[in-house]
Image (tube, grey):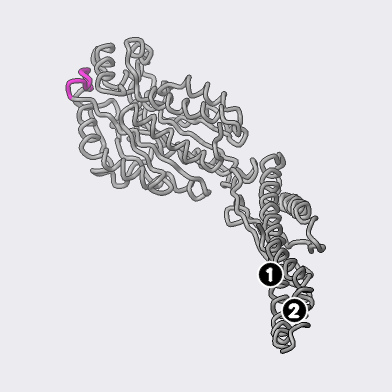
Amino acid sequence: MTAASDALRTFGTLFRRLPALLRRSGSDQSGSLTTMFAFSAIPLIGFVGFATDYGLELAAKSKLDHAADAAVVAAITSAQTYIVNYTGTSDPTNDAITVGKTQALAQFKANTGSLPATVPAPTIGISPAGDGRTFTATVSYSFTMPTIFMKILGTKTMNFAGTASSTLTIPAFTNIHIVIDTSSSMGIGATLKDQQIVFNATGGCAVACHYSGTTTTVRNAGATLRIDVAKNAVVTALNQIANATNSNRFQVAIYTMSSQFKTLVSLTPTISDAITAVQALDIGNYANDGGTNTTNSLKSLSNNLKTDGNGLTQGTAQGFVMLITDGVQDSDIKVAYNGGWTDGYDQYFTAYSPCITPNCKVFSGFAQPITVESFLPSACDAIKSKGYTLMTLNTTYLVPPTSLQTSDPKGAALKSVFDFIQNYLLSSISSNLASCASGSSNAYSANSPTEINNAVQQMFAAAGAQARITN
């Protein structure tokens, strides 16, 4: 039962009893009843009238509040729909705001047509926030309602107003650039068991005998290499994007880095192409390759990246760079020699200056001295300066136990390298890769196959959250 109907019922009862009250006042010779009625009738009727008009006002305000709520939802969702379906390259914000305001006004009018007086058009505002994808809509109304009973007491109208607001973030267009370390160290067995298989299948090799190209042999023997774990994790994550209903909001590029930086797949919305490329990749096995030059690779990538956008259109997509590496850099490359291969020095290698422990060391015992060093965090600065979110995954270098370190003539030299990595570089790499990332929440570290897979999924989830992967 509403306040208005209660008040009307009370007023009706008093009105029906009014003749009887008047007759009683006429027969009362003392005049006291007449006087009392005269003084009490006016405020009583005024009170009932006020209650009636107030009840009608509450009903009208409730309807207007509902209309404003519906209008603000229409404003924000219409603007979102326009932007989500937009396929152009220019900024769609102004057109989206116009569409949102038009729909909001239509929705407001549809919900206020039954009110007893014409409702003025509401004030409708839609404005983007700092990131360009977050929009706030407001609908404000004011209404003057004529009274029914209160006009007897001189109050002809009642005025009231209200405001509704809503905020919505548009899913972002997202470009994901994935850089996968394919240097020889990623040919290490993924677990101690896998390292034993590699050692047995190659007659004493610790890192899948990179130069001899025997990765197929060790895989056929049952070994899973660190590169296999990394690429399988990436494929799993890419499949989630490919199967998402809003996969059109993503583009992916795939790169490999060793001594050379290679583009496997340029930025593409065809996620299946990226999946195929990742499935086929292996550790580098090219002339003038074999080592790890992350610094030069990231420099090459930065030169190819345009400035990051706000994600509102495909042309202004927001960018993420995912770096998957064990973080060990070295200057070694393989060069042709007497029908085979020998050690060479990467002319593009950037060594720490000075090259001293714990970040850098030069090792003899090879055909060419080899510089081994930690990841250089300054290599990431150019990418971050363009606005990209840089994520790093430290696939912790899994140093083989002494019993599985190579027994060939380079064994002593390699043991010195492994000892340096174990005793100094691992901690240095961890902190340097964390410094490379765009904040601590974007720095990941993993060792086992399960940990690596989980870390990659978390990286993609963090990037995809801006575009809201939906299935």
Direction from residue 370 to residue 156 in the image, left or right: right
Q: Residue 452: x and y, percent? A: 36, 31
Quadrant in the rendering for residue 248: top right
Give the amino acid type for the residue marked by disc 2 in the picture: Arg
Please identify the residue farthest to the bottom as the structure is shown.
30
Q: Residue 257: x and y, percent? A: 44, 31
- Nearest the camera: 313 or 334? 313
Q: Earlier in the sequence, mark 1 or mark 2?
A: 2
Q: Does residue 141 appear in the picture of this structure? A: no
Quarter occupied by the C terminus:
top right
The range drawn in magenta is 402-410
Q: Main secondary structure of the magenta part?
A: loop
Residue at mark 1 to residue at mark 2: CA–CA distance: 27 Å
Please, what secondary structure does the residue beneath circle 1 have?
Answer: helix
Identify the residue at image location x=70%, y=57%. 63
Please, what secondary structure does the residue beneath circle 2 have?
Answer: helix
Give the amino acid type for the residue marked by disc 1 in the picture: Ala
Residue 51, disc: 1
Q: Nearer the viewer, mark 1 or mark 2?
A: 2
Tell whether position 404 is magenta: yes
Quadrant in the rendering for residue 323: top left
Residue under label 2: 24
Quadrant in the rendering for residue 171: top right
Instruction: Please say if 255 is above or below 141.
Output: above
